[in-house]
Image (cartoon, grey):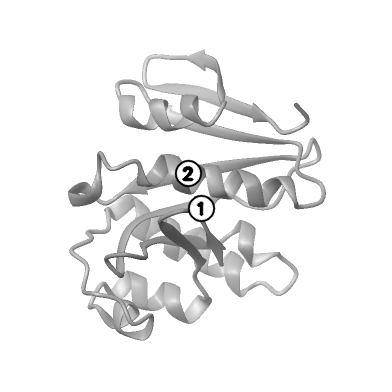
Amino acid sequence: MIQTFRLNLLPLSYDQLQKYIKNDQSLEKELNLKDSTRSISPELIEALQQTILPNVADPAKNYLYSTLWTIINRADRQMVADLCFVGEPNADGEIEIGFGTYEQHQGHGYMTEAVTGMIKWVREQAGVKSIFAQTEMGNFASMSVLQKNGFVQLSSGEKLSSWRLDLNK
């Protein structure tokens, strides 16, 4: 678990991911948290079933780079957001990060704080030289999170913009 000023960032186990997908408050109960009103997009459910769960189940992989990390507001004892890496570092030492804040918790700086905490953790991991991210054009909140954490925009297309944080600086 990673702690920041207000948050706990908890990597979910295989069994916890299955409870997350059920979205029946069983995960919140297990973690002794207040019920959440999170919703799970069809795209996230597909990613969980097709990629995340199989990768977390693979003992040859470091699950911390494959699982969903839930972000918990310690004061409220409530899940407020999630983030994940898209696999272990590639041959160039790059990892990709993805994140999302639950709608009712947006605008409180949780994701900026959580990404800051993850960057600090990643800097301590062997073999990671940079973090890559993509955001949808017009998603100014995500762009702001990346900018506040020192990411540099590499490109912008019709639908997506690409960002990178070099950890050697």
| Residue 79 place in picture, x, y as percent | 32, 64
Sequence order check, earlier mark of 1 and 2 = 1
* Position of residue 21 in the picture relative to residue 121 (left or right): left
Task: Locate residue 70: give its quadrant.
Answer: bottom left
Residue 33 or residue 155, whichever sits in front: 33
Q: Residues within 10 Å of mark 1 (few under 14, many from 20)?
A: many
User: Measured along the vertical axis of the image, is residue 158 above or below residue 80?
Assistant: above
| Residue type for callout 2 | Gly
| Residue of label 1 | 84
* Position of residue 44 in the picture relative to residue 55 (left or right): left
Residues tagged 1 and 2 counted as in contact (Cβ below 8 A): yes
Question: In which quadrant will I find the N terminus?
Answer: bottom right
| Residue of label 2 | 98
Secondary structure of the residue carrying tag 1 is: strand
Residue 70 or residue 134, whichever sits in front: 70
Q: In the image, which disc is placed on residue 146?
A: none
| Residue 117 place in picture, x, y as percent | 55, 49
- Give the residue drawn at x 34%, y 78%: 27
- Give the residue drawn at x 35%, y 71%: 20
Q: CA distance from mark 1 to mark 2?
A: 5 Å
User: Measured along the vertical axis of the image, is residue 21 above or below residue 130?
Assistant: below
* Position of residue 81 in the picture relative to residue 164 (left or right): left
| Residue 39 place in picture, x, y as percent | 22, 59
- Give the residue drawn at x 22%, y 78%: 24
Question: In which quadrant will I find the C terminus?
Answer: top right
Secondary structure of the residue carrying tag 2 is: strand
| Residue type for callout 1 | Cys
User: Measured along the vertical axis of the image, is residue 91 above or below residue 72?
Assistant: above
- Give the residue drawn at x 37%, y 14%: 158
